[in-house]
């Protein structure tokens, strides 16, 4: 029988060793397999990749641009080096890392108005409400029609035939000196005033046979410049890319909007005479006309464009559960070059996610090389078109390279390299979005991985369905979630350089980023190696 004193001493030694191990840093404890391979994820490696991905030479990686294609080539090279397989089909039927697709857009081409030898510039001298397509220059007579109103007993068209001609009219509606509006007979404006009144006036003019409509705005100076800038931004919706070919049917309900100065120049008169005509209508409450007959030339070009782009998909086959697949995603592209020539390098958005996928792929490839490969398969997916409308992930969800019914989850990384204002004094955090929306088990796995290995603050602020930012719907994971695939979106928030030229490598917190990438790795490790596939058991908004 063992001596009691010796036995007591042995127990004391074991307890002392256990307590000592609890106090040791994690890297000095005996490592499990997950911790062993996660150690290959380092700040220096992340930086090594990001200085290339977010360099000026890639010119902001705009969707379909040469810079975006260079980024796709770069990540593909490393996936090949790590032994990952291409599973997309190239045009000749060979396997490729590139899942190619097209975006379609219609945009403004050459747009101008000219009169008396002067050419007026689009979105500088005037803006355009609505949509027109006048591919070849046309010359048209321009006739003044007061306010361009016909309502009850009041009609600016009563004594003017505008069929086959173009009309120019004042914005708004007649208002008496007492402050009452002529049409309503009260202090309330009618349908002939307001933001959409141009549509009512343009529709009436077209019904009267007018070819084109010109509106004289009240705005001048900085107010007019601001309006033109705002309208130029609004007009971009007519130039936004889509996944399907664009079908446009310009109705002709459109209006060229000019200042009084520009309108007077086109009509060959003065601003004073124009304003006198307007005041006469307001004073008398009756239509008035002036023979400002003139001709103008115009062109409104709409052009078609096809953008060729590609997702990058790299496949690691699993072992005994290889038919099930985990997707780990990030978007490869950014917003490119600003109108003033500044490059938006997008180091955080989403260069941080792009290089995170490379580090995750390397860590899993090292595990596989040593016989510790994942039981389930993994698809590393760098999508494009995110900034344009989540198009790359939408294309993948509609044309999956691997069946979505076999896709167990998507772990999506978008902007994890910076600190937002809410955490400027506490950088050890990450926002998690969507982890509990479809699978309670996914949320549990994520929480356990963090508690065991990383110990970051997991901030669920943006997971609240009442959060006005609605980030759950604003990154690529959503195109998986809407198909019933559980997701986690890893995010560290918006900062002052979001979508600006200041989003550069030197501002990335690589020590922080590497810990978040490890959290993704540990979560992925559990997902691909556990006995039972996680199930969809909740449907939260």
Image (tube, helix red, strand yellow):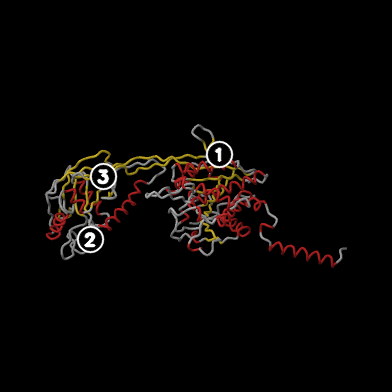
Q: Please rate how many residues cluster around mark 3, counting C-alpha atoms within 10 Å: few if below 14, some from 14 to 19, many from 20.
A: many
Mark 2: secondary structure: loop
Q: CA distance from mark 3 to mark 2?
A: 32 Å
Instruction: Say left or right for 488 vs 136.
Output: right
Mark 3: secondary structure: strand
Report the front residue among 34 and 262. 262
Q: CA distance from mark 1 to mark 2?
A: 64 Å
Nearer mark to the viewer, of 3 and 2: 3
Percent coordinates x, y for residue 195 in the rendering: 27, 56
Using the rendered view, name the quadrant where residue 162 is placed: top left
Q: Decide: is 249 above or below 29.
A: above
Point out the image quarter for the N terminus. bottom right
Mark 1: secondary structure: strand
Nearer mark to the viewer, of 1 and 3: 3
- Say if mark 1 contacts mark 3, CB within 8 Å: no
Q: Please rate how many residues cluster around mark 2, counting C-alpha atoms within 10 Å: few if below 14, some from 14 to 19, many from 20.
A: some
Q: Which residue is mark 3?
A: 112
Percent coordinates x, y for residue 151 in the rendering: 18, 54
Instruction: State the residue at coordinates (57%, 48%).
Output: 408
Report the front residue among 108 and 52. 52
Using the rendered view, name the quadrant where residue 15 is placed: bottom right
Q: Which residue is mark 2?
A: 189
Q: Earlier in the sequence, mark 1 or mark 2?
A: 1
Which circle marks residue 32 in the picture?
Answer: none
Q: CA distance from mark 1 to mark 3?
A: 49 Å
Percent coordinates x, y for residue 478 in the rendering: 48, 51
Q: Earlier in the sequence, mark 3 or mark 2?
A: 3
Looking at the image, which residue sits at the far top? 92
Q: Which residue is mark 1?
A: 86
Percent coordinates x, y for residue 317 in the rendering: 61, 42
Nearer mark to the viewer, of 1 and 2: 1
């Amino acid at each position: 029988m063992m001596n009691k004193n010796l036995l007591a001493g042995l127990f004391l030694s074991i307890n002392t060793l256990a307590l000592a191990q609890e106090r040791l840093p994690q890297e000095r404890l005996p490592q499990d397999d997950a911790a062993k391979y996660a150690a290959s994820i380092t700040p220096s490696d992340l930086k090594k990749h990001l200085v290339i991905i977010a360099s000026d030479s890639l010119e902001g990686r705009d969707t379909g641009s040469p810079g975006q294609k260079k980024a796709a080539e770069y990540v593909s090279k490393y996936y090949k080096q790590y032994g990952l397989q291409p599973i997309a089909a190239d045009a000749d039927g060979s396997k490729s890392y590139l899942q190619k697709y097209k975006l379609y857009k219609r945009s403004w081409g050459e747009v101008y108005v000219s009169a008396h030898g002067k050419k007026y510039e689009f979105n500088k001298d005037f803006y355009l409400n609505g949509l027109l397509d006048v591919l070849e220059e046309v010359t048209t007579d321009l006739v003044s029609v007061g306010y361009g109103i016909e309502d009850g007993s009041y009609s600016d068209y009563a004594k003017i035939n505008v069929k086959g001609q173009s009309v120019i009219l004042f914005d708004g509606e007649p208002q008496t000196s007492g402050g009452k509006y002529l049409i309503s007979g009260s202090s309330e404006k009618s349908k002939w005033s307001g933001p959409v009144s141009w549509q009512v006036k343009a529709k009436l003019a077209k019904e009267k046979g007018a070819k084109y409509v010109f509106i004289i705005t009240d705005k001048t100076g900085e107010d007019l410049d601001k309006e033109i800038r705002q309208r130029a931004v609004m007009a971009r919706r007519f130039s936004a890319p889509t996944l399907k070919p664009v079908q446009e049917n310009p109705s002709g309900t459109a209006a060229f909007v000019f200042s009084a100065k520009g309108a007077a120049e086109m009509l060959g008169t003065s601003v004073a005479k124009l304003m006198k005509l307007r005041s006469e209508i307001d004073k008398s409450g009756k239509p008035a006309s002036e023979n400002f007959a003139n001709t103008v030339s115009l062109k409104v070009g709409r052009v078609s464009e096809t953008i060729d782009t590609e997702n990058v998909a790299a496949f690691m086959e699993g072992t005994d559960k290889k038919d099930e697949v985990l997707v780990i995603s990030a978007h490869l592209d950014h917003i490119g070059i600003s109108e003033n020539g500044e490059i938006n390098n997008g180091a955080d958005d989403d260069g941080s996610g792009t290089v995170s996928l490379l580090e995750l792929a390397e860590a899993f490839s090292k595990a596989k090389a040593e016989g510790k490969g994942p039981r389930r398969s993994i698809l590393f997916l760098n999508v494009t078109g995110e900034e344009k409308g989540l198009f790359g992930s939408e294309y993948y969800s509609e044309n999956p390279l691997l069946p979505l019914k076999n896709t167990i989850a998507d772990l999506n990384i978008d902007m994890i390299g910076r600190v937002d204002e809410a955490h400027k004094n506490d950088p050890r955090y990450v926002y998690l979005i969507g982890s509990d929306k479809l699978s309670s088990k996914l949320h549990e796995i994520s929480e356990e991985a963090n508690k065991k290995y990383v110990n970051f603050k997991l901030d669920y602020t943006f997971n609240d369905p009442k959060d006005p930012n609605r980030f759950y719907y604003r990154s690529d994971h959503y195109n998986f979630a809407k198909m019933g695939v559980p997701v986690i979106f890893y995010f560290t928030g918006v900062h002052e350089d979001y979508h600006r030229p200041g989003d550069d490598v030197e501002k990335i917190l690589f020590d922080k980023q590497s810990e978040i990438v490890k959290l993704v790795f540990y979560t992925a490790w559990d997902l691909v190696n556990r006995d039972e596939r996680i199930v969809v058991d909740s449907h939260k908004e």
